[in-house]
Amino acid sequence: MRYWIPLFLLGNSLFAAQPTLDADLKTAVSALHERYIDALKKGDPAAFAALFNANGMVLTSGAPMIQGQAKIQRDREALFARAKIINGALRPSHLEQSGDLAYEVGRFSYTIQVDDQPQRIIEGKYLTIWKRDTEGQWRYQVDAGIPD
């Protein structure tokens, strides 16, 4: 009898449902990453905010939550007035989907110049929640970055 428990557990783990991704999700996320970095480098707050759903959110350490495209755009206007993103990279490590929601975990790295200070590199981790909108397009629902 003691052999049945391990075999039963092994059988369950072998046949457990594995996460699946829509074929378009990985492609959409990759394209959104490119547009995200492009908007940062160009200092384009409207293009940045357009990547989010209407009630999307930006969460950063040491700052209040920003919710809604208009507020995200105003926040980025203030940021881009002082800071220039010279370069940036997003390196996803995990992407998982459940219906019209998906989440991604990864690392980021930005070369940034604030005011007249020397350029510096900011690195950290991020968690993004993606949500498919009513037109079927994937957009940021929550973007949370945590510097190291």
Image (cartoon, rainbow, N blue to C red):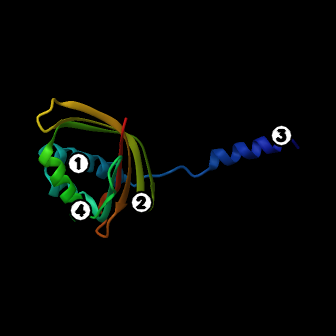
Could you tell me the amino acid type at mark 4?
Answer: Lys
> Reading the chain from its start, which is encountered first: label 4 or label 1?
1
In the rendered view, does 60 fall on the left or right side of 69? right
Quarter the N terminus occupies: top right
> Reading the chain from its start, which is encountered first: label 3 or label 4?
3
Question: Residue 82 appears in which quarter of the rendering?
Answer: top left
Instruction: Identify the mark at residue 101; answer none if there is no mark.
Output: 2
> Reading the chain from its start, which is encountered first: label 2 or label 1?
1
Could you tell me the amino acid type at mark 1?
Answer: Tyr
Numbered disc 3: secondary structure: loop
Of labels 2 and 4, the one closer to you: 4
Residue 122 place in picture, x, y as percent: 28, 34
CA distance separating discs 3 and 4: 60 Å
> Reading the chain from its start, which is encountered first: label 3 or label 1?
3
Residue highlighted by disc 1: 36
Question: Residue 55 appears in which quarter of the rendering?
Answer: bottom left
Q: Residues within 10 Å of mark 2 (few under 14, many from 20)?
A: some
Residue highlighted by disc 3: 3
> Reading the chain from its start, which is encountered first: label 3 or label 2?
3
CA distance separating discs 2 and 1: 19 Å
Residue 25 place in picture, x, y as percent: 35, 53
CA distance separating discs 4 and 1: 17 Å
User: Toward the viewer: 31 or 44?
Assistant: 44
Question: Residue 93 appears in which quarter of the rendering?
Answer: top left
Residue highlighted by disc 4: 71
